[in-house]
Amino acid sequence: AQKVTQAQTEISVVEKEDVTLDCVYETRDTTYYLFWYKQPPSGELVFLIRRNSFDEQNEISGRYSWNFQKSTSSFNFTITASQVVDSAVYFCALSGGRYGGSQGNLIFGKGTKLSVKP
Amino acid sequence: GAVVSQHPSRVICKSGTSVKIECRSLDFQATTMFWYRQFPKQSLMLMATSNEGSKATYEQGVEKDKFLINHASLTLSTLTVTSAHPEDSSFYICSAREQVTGGWNTIYFGEGSWLTVV
């Protein structure tokens, strides 16, 4: 069975603090994809990153960085120098199964609500 | 701009009536679309996979006769909530898969539709 666990339900930080959102996944597939999405209060999903299971390089995009550790089945997301606009619910998701995860049906974690206070 | 459009973004309907939500891919043809449901403060759960020209594949526990999915063209999938009840009130979001040869099939999410049944 496939599963995504985001143990942190809510996190509250003060602006300019760094914050890491944890994501642990379970899958028996050898090929799969991992994602992070941001969901602001308006509801739409904003795509942040996609990582395939063969690429364990960490990635940095501006204030965002991701740490993919296959050995611990984790795909953690760090926001450096957080800002109020970062306040949202963040979802980690997994796509696996048939066709090596390219089907496109995602399994989402329960999300972590991040509140950044000024 | 959005490449997947959902309509309506918000809808209120009376209990017992049916409501249709549309999901359109604007710049590409989508042979496969996905419908997710999100209860307040919860994660997104895949309801069904919509395949153009064939029957949708429903996830376990999702009532086929209640949530009718039609994917009549390569750019449009519709979700009809039949005989809606207050417990059907939720955020419904679709995604569409853009077929790419030899690579990841990019997934685009719609903006979501808030359904309130009164």
Image: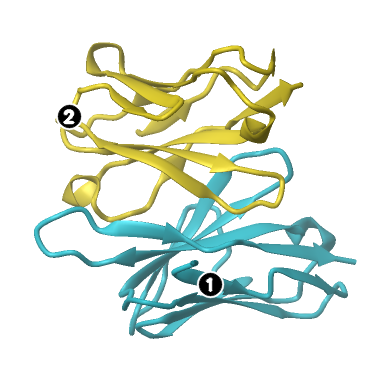
| Chain assigned cyan | B
The residue located at (65%, 26%) in the rendering is A114
Number of other residues with Cα within 10 Å of mark 1, as a class: few under 14, some 14 to 19, many 20 or more: many
- The tally of labels here is 2
Q: Amino acid at mark 1?
A: Ser
Q: Residue at x 50, y 18 (%)?
A: A80
Neighbourhood count class around disc 2 (C-alpha, 10 Å): few under 14, some 14–19, many 20 upward: few
The amino acid sitting under disc 2 is: Asp
Q: Is residue B114 left or right of residue A100?
A: right
Apparent side of residue A3 relative to residue B7 in the rendered image (left or right): left
Q: Secondary structure at mark 2?
A: loop
Give the quarter of the image for residue B72.
bottom left
Q: Nearer the viewer, residue A67 or A79?
A: A79
Tell whether label 2 touches label 1 (CB within 8 Å). Answer: no
Q: Which residue is mark 2?
A: A55
Where is residue B89 drawn, in percent x and y?
77, 59
Q: Residue at x 58, y 72 (%)?
A: B6
Q: Quadrant of residue B83?
A: bottom right
Q: Is residue A115 above or below residue B7?
A: above
**Image position, residue B104 (x, y; %):** 21, 53
Residue, far bottom: B72
User: How far is the residue under mark 1 from the one under mark 2?
Assistant: 31 Å
Q: Colour of chain A?
A: yellow
Question: Residue at coordinates 83% horizontally, 66% vertically from top-left?
Answer: B117
Identify the element where label 1 is drawn: strand
Residue B99 pos. (x, y %): 23, 67
Residue nearest the viewer, comparing A82 with B43: A82
Give the residue at mark 1.
B5
Q: Which corner quadrant holds the C terminus of chain B?
A: bottom right
Viewed as shown, does residue A61 lie left or right of B115? left
- Chain of the residue on which disc 2 is drawn: A
